Amino acid sequence: MGGRSGRADLRRWGLGLDAGHAQWFKDHGRWGHTPRRGAIVFFDWQGSKNIPAIDHVGIVESVRSNGTIVTIEGNTSNRVMRRERSGLVAGYGYPAYSSKPAPKPEVSWTEEIVKTLPLLKRGARGYDVKTLFYLLHARSMGLNDTIDDTVFGGPLEDALRAFQKAAGLKVDGECGPKTWPKLMRVD
């Protein structure tokens, strides 16, 4: 397997592919214990953090504020899966990150639309309130067709507060520039 990966030298260490790659990162000064987006994460299911004991590997997709990592991993139930992990990490191999800042992504048409949406709060009326109602309804936030979908009243505010809490936003019951993108999934 090491030969097919272009890393025939892994066999001389007597290490498996996962452990061999971890050793390569360590030997090249690119090994550490701080999760970073894009890093290769190496797992030791026994928790020893010893490179020869590494059992599994993935790629860090993101690092959550609570310290858990979101990974992309193969050989998980015979498929590639996104997983959330909080332990049993032996270490991280850091790729050669670019020193140049990433180019600013183009703004999509949905991002442009979100910028034009108004601040909505209790008492607001009209089509924007209807849009808010149906976005919350589509996310199963407890709204039904017995509620007036053109008036921002108590039930809509309660549903919006529940959504803001679930989305990790400031819970203020107002739909503005931080809430609209989350509702429309363009953040």
Image (cartoon, rainbow, N blue to C red):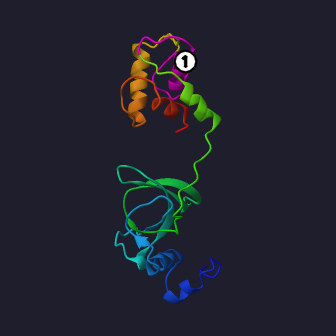
x 39%, y 23%: residue = 173
x 49%, y 87%: residue = 13
Considering depth in this image, is 135 or 125 the residue closer to the camera? 125
- Quadrant containing the N terminus is bottom right
The amino acid at mark 1 is: Asp
Give the SS element for disc 1.
helix
**Rendered location of residue 170, percent (x, y):** 36, 32
Q: Is residue 35 above or below residue 12?
A: above
**Rendered location of residue 184, percent (x, y):** 55, 32
Q: Which residues are magenta?
A: 122-144
Considering depth in this image, is 28 or 12 the residue closer to the camera? 28
Query: Number of marks in the image?
Result: 1
**Rendered location of residue 60, percent (x, y):** 48, 59
**Rendered location of residue 34, percent (x, y):** 38, 63
Residue 134 in magenta stretch: yes
Considering depth in this image, is 21 or 128 the residue closer to the camera? 128
Residue 145 in magenta stretch: no
Residue identified by numbered label 1: 128
Residue 118 vs residue 105: left or right?
A: left
Q: Is residue 164 above or below residue 125?
A: below
Residue 45 vs residue 39: left or right?
A: left
Q: How dense is the environment of label 1, judged by Cα within 10 Å: few (below 14), some, or many (20 and up)?
A: some
